Amino acid sequence: MAKFKSGMSSEDWALAILVVIIVVVALFVVSIVGELAAKIATGAIGLGGSIVLAVLKHGMEAARTRRDALWLEKQRNYKKLLENIGGFVRSNCKNYDPLTISHIESWVFGDSEVVMKTNAFMQNPNPESLIDLLQCMRASIGPPELESLDMNSYKTVVLFPKSEGHF
């Protein structure tokens, strides 16, 4: 066996070189596998994020659809209520059925303040209680950008001309 100046035999050198080659190859494989694992992990995280985002978006759209449907039903009910207020004001009877029916629907679809203002109007039909009801409905259904109406300068006789009814 040949010995080198370092005192290592050629077999020791061969073994050392073999170990260095194995370590270099192992590091190369680990770097390749590490890059692949990082790419797989990145893809999995991206896919998971996309799934979570899709679920959240669907939930928000479903909630918006339900809210819009309720808003449209409230709007339909208020329109019906308004259609029947005129007949009630112009009639002499206290129990005007169409208004009573729309008022009952308000208990399902309307805001509690609208229900209370409708009760007040039906118990004491006068221009002030009507204006309170109309303003409450406007606030309930209207978008925030609607300006408030100055009802002090509004004359209810324009809306309901003098008749033999409640006003």
Image (cartoon, rainbow, N blue to C red):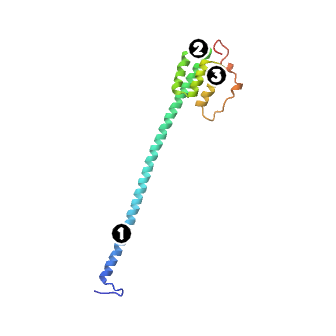
User: Image quadrant of residue 148?
Assistant: top right
Residue 135 marker? none
Q: In this view, does 104 lie above or below 58?
A: above
Tag in front: 2 or 1: 2
Disc 3 secondary structure class: helix
Residue 94 marker? 2
User: Seen in the image, is 125 located left or right of residue 49?
Assistant: right
User: Image quadrant of residue 123?
Assistant: top right
Q: Is residue 126 above or below residue 70?
A: above
Q: Nearer the viewer, residue 108 or 76?
A: 108
The span from disc 2 to disc 3 (Cα, nearest Å) is: 15 Å
Residue type at mark 3: give it: Ser
- Please name the residue that numbered disc 3 is placed on: 129
Q: How crowded is mark 3: few (under 14 residues within 10 Å), some or many (20 or more)?
A: some
Q: Could you tell me which residue is drawn at 51 percent across and 34 percent down?
A: 67
Q: In which quarter of the image is the N terminus?
A: bottom left
**Residue reaching furthest left?**
1
Q: How crowded is mark 1: few (under 14 residues within 10 Å), some or many (20 or more)?
A: few
Q: Could you tell me which residue is drawn at 51 percent across and 26 percent down?
A: 108
Q: In this view, does 38 lie above or below 8?
A: above
User: Image quadrant of residue 152?
Assistant: top right
Q: Position of residue 165 (x, y in %)?
A: 63, 13
